[in-house]
Amino acid sequence: MSVLENFFDYFLSKSEHLREETYKNYHETVRRIVLDEKNPKANVMLAIQLAAIYELRFYKKYYDVTLRIMEMQNDAWKSSEWISYYKKEFEETKSFILKKQNVCNQKLEFFLSILKYSTFAFLIYFIILVINKLALMGVNYLFK
């Protein structure tokens, strides 16, 4: 039992560590996006920001807030000479996230419909069993 407990503790601590790393990486990525582009190394900043926008696609947990941040930042980029680059990456990332969310929602709806119908089928099955049991016990007045 001790080996299982140790494995479980290790797994939990590793999961927590990965969650913390993901959180730090996500916020570092967002920080890179909103940095002031008036840096003399604008081309480098552009590349860093475009890469950061692309990376946001892989932070599933943060999709909703990512879309809001990108919309907000999109307004700030309107005065940038690099707007066409930002706009393209922004739209592709937004499209990617919305597709992923749509697929997740479809899977959830499908699962819930199966659950709903299987619950309904189980309920009908249970009622038939009860009626059958009552009929076997000689309570025939239910069917009159």
Image (cartoon, rainbow, N blue to C red):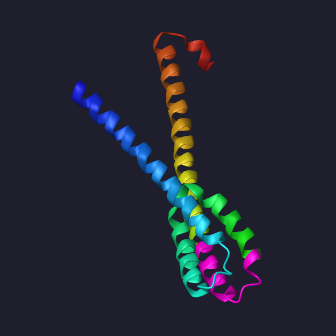
**Quarter the C terminus occupies:** top right
Q: Work out whether 63 lies above or below 124.
A: below
Q: Which stretch is magenta?
A: 76-95
Q: Residue at x 44, y 43 (%)?
A: 16
Q: Position of residue 99 (x, y in %)?
A: 57, 68
Residue located farthest toward the top when viewing the structure as drawn: 138
Q: Position of residue 125 (x, y in %)?
A: 49, 31
**Quarter the N terminus occupies:** top left
Residue nearest the viewer, comparing 128 with 76: 76
Residue located farthest toward the front when viewing the structure as drawn: 40
Residue nearest the viewer, comparing 26 with 114: 26
Q: Work out whether 87 lies above or below 3.
A: below
Q: Work out whether 37 lies above or below 108.
A: below
State the predominant SS element of the stretch in magenta: helix
Residue 85 covered by magenta stretch: yes
Q: Quadrant of residue 9?
A: top left
Q: Position of residue 127 (x, y in %)?
A: 54, 25
Q: Work out whether 85 lies above or below 59.
A: below
Q: Quadrant of residue 74?
A: bottom right
